[in-house]
């Protein structure tokens, strides 16, 4: 077994190069001397350049090299933690590996794994910095695959930060880089089209979103990736619902639920059935909606999924309201409220239903109070569409009650806040 330094020295001498000649434009001759004597470890960038100058592929350079087993073991342990979703535990191990780089493991790979851990632990600024460095390294090596993967993650960070136009920019750039790869990565392309479908749905560009979802469907179908197909169908259901094509929305939601069930993704299947029930409800298919909701509620209770049960109960309360079961809808809302976290979008919908209940009973002030609580919830969670619709209902109630000046102020608030929020997300009206 050779050390890395011994292998580099052997190859240099076979090429008839001096340490000065090997170092030229890469590092100092002193650094080459330290590397060859195993007193220093080159960075991945330097190692890659050395391999190129020595006319040897990087994997060939490392063949039979006596690797630092402890270093490799630490990396394997970090990867195992990531697979187990123990991201916080993996972070210090990956940070340690970056602080003491070795040639055995690509520095770019470590940075990418660490960036993923930062995303999963909501350290988005740190993740963004790392993925930008990964992109830069990919650019230096003209490695289009690395650039595309880094841009994919940068888009994901912008999406999580609700900076949707920046997310679109990064994902479109990633697709351009993926198209330059010598060997096509169908999974990567499919994922990027799916993400673009998601974000374009968020920005209201429904037909553009559907075009990307369809492209993703074709790509995932080629590799028979049923899991991703299910997510794409889910996205298409949401997009068609936004476009008010309830029949198509329902069709794709049903397909997504069926695929999740086939894949034995129990939680995802049940969630999608609740979404399908909501679509049935919107389309007036009340009996079918009740069947799915009853099934989902029973399963969530068996599993002890309190939050999921609460979300399903909110849809069930809407179903009861549609059936004019006013008292039952009110009681179901109260049950759901106790199951859900205080800051949860469905707390807003609970107050929307309770506002309808109060209005039905002629309690106009209580209805306004409930609607304002719903609006405040939607606003705090960045749900601009739901907030806008709720505030508009408040304005109509005030107008009908003869409080025209208050109604006008509400309309002005809708206009101002909606414009500010959309501009922050890069959406110009």
Image (cartoon, rainbow, N blue to C red):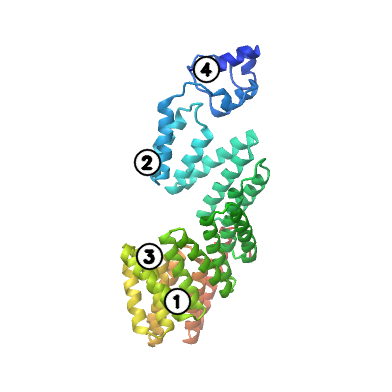
- Mark nearest the camera among 1 and 4 is 1
Q: Residue at x 68, y 43 (%)?
A: 180
Q: CA distance from mark 3 to mark 4?
A: 57 Å
Q: Quadrant of the C terminus?
A: bottom right
Whether residues under marks 2 and 4 lie with C-beta atoms below 8 angstroms apart, the answer is: no
Q: Is residue 53 left or right of residue 134?
A: right
Count residues near mark 1 (Cα–Cα under 10 Å), then give few for <14, some for 14-19, many for 20+.
Answer: many
Q: Secondary structure at mark 3?
A: helix
Secondary structure of the residue carrying tag 4 is helix
Q: Earlier in the sequence, mark 1 or mark 2?
A: 2
Query: Horizontal and vertical percent for residue 167?
Result: 58, 53
- Going from N to C along the chain, the mark reached first, 1 or 4, is 4
In percent of width and height, residue 189 lies at: 61, 50
Residue 190: image location, x then y, percent: 60, 53
- Which image quadrant is residue 312 in? bottom left
- What residue would you read off at disc 2? 89
Q: Residues within 10 Å of mark 2 (few under 14, many from 20)?
A: few
**Label 2 vs label 4: CA separation?**
33 Å
Which one is nearer the viewer's eye here, 257 or 73?
257
In this rendering, which labeled residue sits more in front, label 2 or label 4? 4
Find residue 245 and report its horizontal and vertical position in percent.
59, 74
Q: Name the secondary structure under disc 2.
A: helix
Which type of secondary structure does the marked residue at label 1 adopt? helix
Depicted 294 relative to depicted 215: above or below: below
- Residue for badge 4: 5
């Amino acid at each position: 077994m050779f050390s890395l330094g011994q292998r580099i020295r052997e190859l240099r001498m076979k090429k008839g190069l001096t340490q000065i000649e090997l170092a030229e434009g890469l590092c100092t001759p002193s650094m080459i001397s330290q590397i060859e004597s195993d007193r220093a470890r080159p960075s991945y960038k330097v190692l890659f350049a050395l391999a190129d100058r020595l006319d040897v592929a990087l994997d060939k350079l490392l063949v039979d090299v006596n690797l630092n087993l402890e270093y490799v073991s630490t990396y394997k342990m970090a990867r195992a933690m990531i697979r187990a979703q123990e991201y916080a535990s993996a972070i210090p191990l990956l940070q340690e590996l970056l602080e003491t780089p070795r040639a055995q493991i690509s520095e770019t790979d470590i940075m990418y794994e660490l960036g993923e851990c930062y995303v999963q632990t909501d350290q988005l600024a740190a993740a963004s910095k790392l993925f930008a460095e990964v992109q830069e390294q990919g650019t230096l090596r003209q490695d289009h695959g690395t650039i595309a993967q880094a841009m994919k993650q940068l888009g994901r960070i912008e999406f999580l930060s609700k900076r949707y136009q920046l997310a679109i920019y990064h994902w479109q750039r990633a697709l351009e880089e993926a198209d330059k790869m010598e060997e096509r990565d169908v999974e990567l392309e499919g994922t990027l089209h799916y993400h673009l479908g998601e974000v374009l749905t968020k920005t209201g560009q429904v037909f553009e979103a559907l075009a990307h979802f369809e492209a993703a469907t074709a790509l995932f179908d080629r590799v028979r990736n049923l899991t991703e197909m299910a997510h794409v169908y889910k996205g298409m259901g949401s997009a068609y619902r936004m476009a008010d094509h309830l029949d198509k929305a329902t069709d794709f939601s049903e397909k997504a639920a069926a695929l999740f069930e086939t894949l034995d993704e129990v939680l995802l299947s049940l969630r999608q059935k609740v979404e399908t029930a909501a679509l049935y409800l919107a389309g007036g298919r009340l009996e079918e909606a009740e069947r799915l909701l009853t099934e989902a509620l029973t399963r969530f209770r068996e599993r002890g999924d309190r939050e999921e049960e609460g979300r399903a109960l909110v849809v069930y309360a809407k179903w009861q309201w549609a059936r004019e079961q006013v008292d039952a809808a009110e009681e179901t809302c109260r049950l759901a409220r106790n199951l859900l976290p205080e800051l949860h979008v469905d707390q807003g919908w609970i107050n929307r239903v309770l506002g309808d209940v109060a209005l039905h009973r002629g309690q106009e002030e209580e209805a306004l109070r409930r609607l304002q609580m719903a609006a405040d919830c939607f606003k705090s969670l960045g749900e601009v569409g739901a907030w806008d619709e709720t505030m508009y209902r408040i304005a109509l109630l005030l107008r009908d009650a003869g409080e025209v000046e208050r109604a006008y102020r509400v309309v002005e608030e809708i206009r101002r806040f909606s414009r500010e929020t959309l501009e922050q997300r890069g959406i110009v009206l």
